[in-house]
Amino acid sequence: MIHVPVLQEEVKSFLTTECPAVFVDATLGAGGHAELLLEACPKMKLIGIDRDGEIMSLTEKRLAKYGERVLTVRDNYRNLDAALGAAGAEKVDGFLFDLGVSSLELDSPERGFSFKYDSPLDMRMDRTQKLTAEDIVNTADETELADAIFKYGEERFSRRIAKNICSARAVKRISTTAELVDIINRSVPPAYRHGRIHPATRTFQALRIVVNDELNGLREALAKAEGSLNQGGKLAVISFHSLEDRIVKRFFVEKAKCETPSLKILTKKPVIAGDAERESNPRSRSAKLRVAEKL
């Protein structure tokens, strides 16, 4: 499946009215947003950062036509300062964070992100790291599992799911997504199994967040991005669930409302996709864009 970046017109509207000289796509992914910005700003140089080396290899080929205008760095965006140092950039004119999982990751069965496939329980965005979803499911104690599924997945049946995971792994190690989905289905009421979203959605989200330490990484990355912006530079973040959006909103408010403000919030409310995009690209339905400007 081709990854279609969300909120393309909105991103372009906020970030290219005054074209930045040096821009950072901190979640390069398949390069959709990067290409959009490079086309809109012919003189702009772009630094693309991503922790997923497999996708980055494909994206580098896609962006090769822009030559020296594009520099890629394989790293986790929480290491933004080191990544910018590697790119030879101390200060830049803008950042974009698209916090969603790439369709290329979701639709690769061997990556274990999706409950649609019977695949290994992996969920690592960077497959050089050791910790996997299988490790967490089979080693975390029941309370830790329940708390994580509730906190990061906002799953109301987290206690039942955690209890049944621990019972199942006492008999046999849980190693595939299908095994986990079966446990989840047995842990929730029949009506819940036929609801608006798949009953495994929230648990899989929680495990992915824990495996990749996404929320702590986001907090670190936002602080480093704000500190690396030139005056007038833009910081744009697209989130896909309430936990991420809450972190971004609080960070923006803290920096805009403190005694010596360093950011001006440009989006009083998060920008969401219009009806046409929501219809053509279902992934956009949960997307929220927030943008701030460095003072």
Image: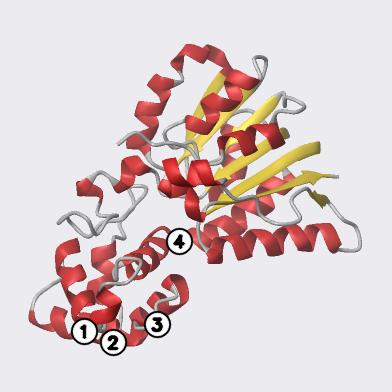
Provide the residue designation for mark 2: 160
| Residue type, numbered disc 1 | Asn
The tag earlier along the polypeptide, 1 or 3, is 3
Q: Is residue 176 visible?
A: no
| Residue drawn at point x = 56 percent, y = 26 percent | 36
Q: Amino acid at mark 2?
A: Arg
Give coordinates of residue 66: x percent, y percent.
52, 14
Q: Are marks 2 and 1 in contact (CB under 8 Å)?
A: yes
Residue 57 is situated, as x and y percent measured from the top left of the image, at: 36, 28
Amino acid type, callout 3:
Arg
User: In percent of the image, x 70 and y 64: which residue is there?
Assistant: 250
Residue tagged 4: 213
Which badge, 2 or 4, comes first in the chain's sequence? 2
- Dot 1 lies on which element? helix
Label 4 with label 3: CB-CB less than 8 Å: no
Q: Secondary structure at mark 2?
A: helix
| The C terminus sits in image quarter | top right
Q: Nearer the viewer, mark 1 or mark 3?
A: 3
Is the C-beta separation of discs 2 and 3 under 8 Å?
no
Q: Position of residue 26 (x, y in %)?
A: 55, 40
Callouts 1 and 3 close, C-beta under 8 Å: no
Q: Earlier in the sequence, mark 4 or mark 3?
A: 3
Q: Earlier in the sequence, mark 1 or mark 4?
A: 1
- Rendered image: mark on residue 148: none
Disc 3: which residue = 156
| Quarter the N terminus occupies | top left
